[in-house]
Amino acid sequence: MAKDQPSYLSLRRSCYLLLLLSFFSSFLFICWSYFSNRCYADVPIAVEADKRELNLLSAWNSLHFPSEPPSRLLKLAVFVKKWPDKHHAGGLERHAMTLHQDLARRGHELHVFTSSSTNVTSIDNLHFHLSQPTAAGYLDQATIWKQFQAEDSTGRPFDVVHTESVGLMHFRARNLNNIAVSWHGIAYESIHSDIIQELLRAPQHKQYDHVGDVLKRIYMLPEERVHIILNGVDEGIFKPEANSGEDLKLAFGIQESTPLILGIAGRYKELGSNLRILGPLDQAQLARVYNVIDIFVNPTLRAQGSDHTLLEAMLVGKPLMATKLASITGSVVFSQEIGYTFSPTVDMLKKALYDVWKDGRVTLQKKGQLARERALKLFTAIKMAAAYERLFLCIAENTKEGKHNGRTHDKNSKFCHRRLQVTTRSYINQTVPSCMIPALNV
């Protein structure tokens, strides 16, 4: 037994030595992989040095559009999943209706391929091709494609095809060279939600996350093919009216002595007797409600595109209070001059409400005036329709020229050339190891 003890100790030392060597070898391998990537696997990327989160001058809404009718009237095909019913519609449906009705009023011939609707507008040059949706609620691709081909094969083919939020699937659209695809929020945005990022990001870190940037950086779409057009709402409906909505105050028992009236988007019936639940409203009724309130509050927890309710309240001349999401702070509530933003926590919401109460009605009215001025410059339906019209004319002209000389894209065409003075933006070319790119915060 005494003879076996030294051999046992020797075996034990050998095991410890092998374990130490194994750990040290693994450490060296990790270091070698990391530093070899730094030396040999560099990927050049461009990091923007602009201090602003989003340069709105890159949006087509910032262009100046002539008031006279367009020099060329187009035949447009529009694919959209739903056309809004009177009281039941989301932001996408309202956007589609507002945009394409305005384009029809400007003289263009529109053909809308959508699912069955009870709210088919009677405009002479706005035509509907209805079909039953699939069980999942999407457009029946086989049916709408047959409808499209039948209309396209008439004496005048379509100049431009517009598919809203992938209403027409890629396997149908891939052979079209005159197509415009509009995104109103994408899957990557939902996964990369700022609600999740808020838990991981230090307070001082800069946020930069909007659809146009994601399409270029993540989906790798060529920059010249991605155009930003901000949403717009009907400025003829949403406007300040001094006495509008006074009857609503009486109907819902709101006293004149009430210090502050908040208009809130969402379902909050269980929060107490000081809340009035109005239910679904049409646009005219909604405009009256905006005229009654002192400030519009949208405490959403979803990363999304520019919410129409925010734009509607701005056009009525109301300040905003909304969750600090990139799509909101980047384009809508860009400064405290027109409203308030808060991180999606109860404490931050309470703090923002306290700031509103402390500022009072006079300050809120000033913020509302500035909000309306900003909305009139960027977020009207007329401006949105004019921007889409310019883009569609650009596509149609390029497609026509391409058939004659083989070109498919011409930046110098009169409709594609952007006469806009943009402030100089500096870019810093950096070389970053590819293994570090997913963790890069810009």
Image (cartoon, rainbow, N blue to C red):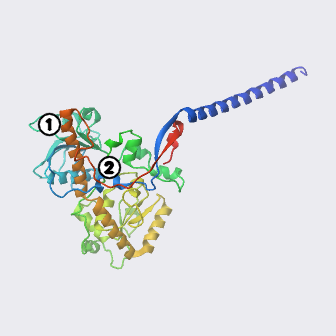
Whole-number angstrom distance, CA of label 2 to CA of label 1: 28 Å
Residue 16 picture quarter: top right
Q: Residue furthest right?
A: 2
Q: Residue at x 46, y 56 (%)?
A: 51
Residue 59 in picture, x, y percent from top left: 32, 52
Left or right: 120 in relation to 321: left
Residue 48 in picture, x, y percent from top left: 45, 49
Q: Secondary structure at mark 2?
A: loop
Left or right: 209 in relation to 170: right
Question: Quick check: can you spot residue 42?
Answer: yes
Q: Residue type at mark 2?
A: Ile
The front one of 192 and 283 is 192
Q: Residue at x 28, y 50 (%)?
A: 418
Residue 332 picture quarter: bottom left
Q: Residue furthest bottom?
A: 257
Question: Pointer 2 and pointer 1: residues touching (CB < 8 Å)?
Answer: no
Residue picked out by circle 1: 152
Q: Residue type at mark 1?
A: Asp
Earlier in the chain: of badge 2 and badge 1, it is: 1
Left or right: 398 in relation to 1: left
Residue 181 picture quarter: top left
Classed neighbour count for the residue bearing mark 2: other residues with Cα under 10 Å, few (<14), some (14–19), many (≥20): some
Q: Nearer the viewer, mark 2 or mark 1?
A: 2
Image quadrant occupied by the N terminus: top right
Residue 119 in picture, x, y percent from top left: 17, 52
Identify the mark at residue 228; answer none if there is no mark. 2
Classed neighbour count for the residue bearing mark 1: other residues with Cα under 10 Å, few (<14), some (14–19), many (≥20): some
Question: Quick check: can you spot residue 312?
Answer: no
Q: How many marks?
A: 2
